[in-house]
Image (cartoon, rainbow, N blue to C red):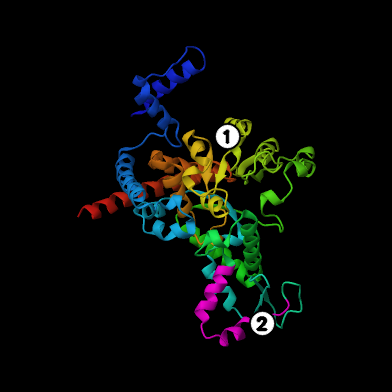
Amino acid sequence: MTGSWITRAVFSIWFCLLAVCRFIPTLHDRDELMKVEQFEFTGGNLLSTEKEIRVNDILMKIKREEVAEGMETGKFPPAMHFFRAKQLIEQSRVFDILKKMPKGAALHLHDYALLNAEWLVKNATYLPNCYICFTAAGGTRFHFSLRSPQKRSAKCLQWALLEKYRRQLKNVTEFDNSLYRNLTLVTENPEEAYPSQNVIWRRFEDAFKAASDLISYAPVFKTYFYEALREFLLDNVLYIEIRALLHPVGQEDAGHSLWYFKNELLIPKEAGVSLPFFFHAGETDFEGTSVDENVLDALLLNTSRIGHGYSINKHPTARRISREFNVPLEICPISNQVLLLVTDLRNHPAASLMADGHPMVISADDPAAFGARGLSYDFYEAFMGIGGLKAELTTLKQLALSSIKYSAMSVEMKVESIKLWLRKWDEFLDKVLNMSMWDEL
């Protein structure tokens, strides 16, 4: 369709850039260069069907209106802290469309922060024999037992049976809301509550420990993961990959580097086993530290994907290897913002990666801890903030297809998943067109 002239333009410009000829751009080349930039953007080289073009026109019209409104009011959700932006996002027509979109796979998720914490409060904490302890730091711990727990520590000196404790309260709803806040990072004043990365990571780890007390109880465990899968399915996510936490594994800056563990990590290779690694790497703002160098070491240690890879733009060699060997980054926009790596998601390092068509997938990391559900919120932040106005329907399509391509599924499963996704994608296009028809009436 429109691909032929773009291909010629890309070929001619890159042919010159490779020193076969000397290309010196002039003002007359502006339109061609802009087309080349769009072609290189994530999804820019995908051809569109007539139906996709119609849906893209609708989507981009709504997107431009919402961006213009954000510029006028000064309330553009990707530029705001997620805890303040969440309500605005939920009112967005773009978000409404993204919720209906089949998003493929979520490949970077942690086990005890999958399902919204409201479910834990309303279900797990109301089970019989659930005891609670309030820590000196203002946190909570839970324990299921037929009799009052004997385990005590400096943090937990006294346990109370929750069923009995609730009967003594005047306002159970407010108490349950406080439990929700203890199981998440959600707060009305995030800048006040979390003035530094060290503070928020301590709070983050405390919330994880409280959640794990509830989820690791066998009667909760099975139902929790069933409901988590159901929640992602309702958000039109077809497949997820889950990472188990090994305490105190958490803040990358506070831990050892990958290179520190290189001897242990090389054991499978020395034994002749090809083990697929999925390393977190580069979840840091600090440049030049051993942890910062994890992005390169992850590639040297043969990682299948790079978890976050936030600092990769500071490592051109790692960026080049990641691109050339097709090792994608797992971009988690909301997590990076809430955990204080970036304030305004328009400035996220993935913006330049997306502009360059770098291999990547969008994921949610710990949606329950951030008060989110599923994957739509992160897709919104990536589409509206990181991708800016250059991100179109083809960008969304590429991100969804990439999530299946880079998953740990077998080749056969990927083929079947692509077939399923394409069918759901076509249904999604029809839904958007029908939405538009209703708007016009």
**Dominant SS in magenta:** helix
Q: Is residue 410 left or right of residue 89?
A: right
Residue farthest to the left, as pictured: 441
Q: Does the segment drawn in magenta span residue 180? A: yes
Q: Circle 1 is placed at which residue position?
A: 326
Q: Position of residue 228 (x, y in %)?
A: 54, 62
Residue at figure coordinates x 36%, y 36% from the top left: 48
Camera-side mark, 1 or 2: 2
The amino acid type, in three-letter code, at marker 1 is Asn
Quarter of the rendering containing residue 306: top right
Which of disc 2 and disc 1 is earlier in sequence?
A: 2
Q: Is residue 416 left or right of residue 75?
A: right
Q: Circle 2 is placed at which residue position?
A: 160
- Seen in the picture, residue 406 relative to 134 is either above or below; the reply is above
The amino acid type, in three-letter code, at marker 2 is Ala
Q: Which residues are magenta?
A: 157-182
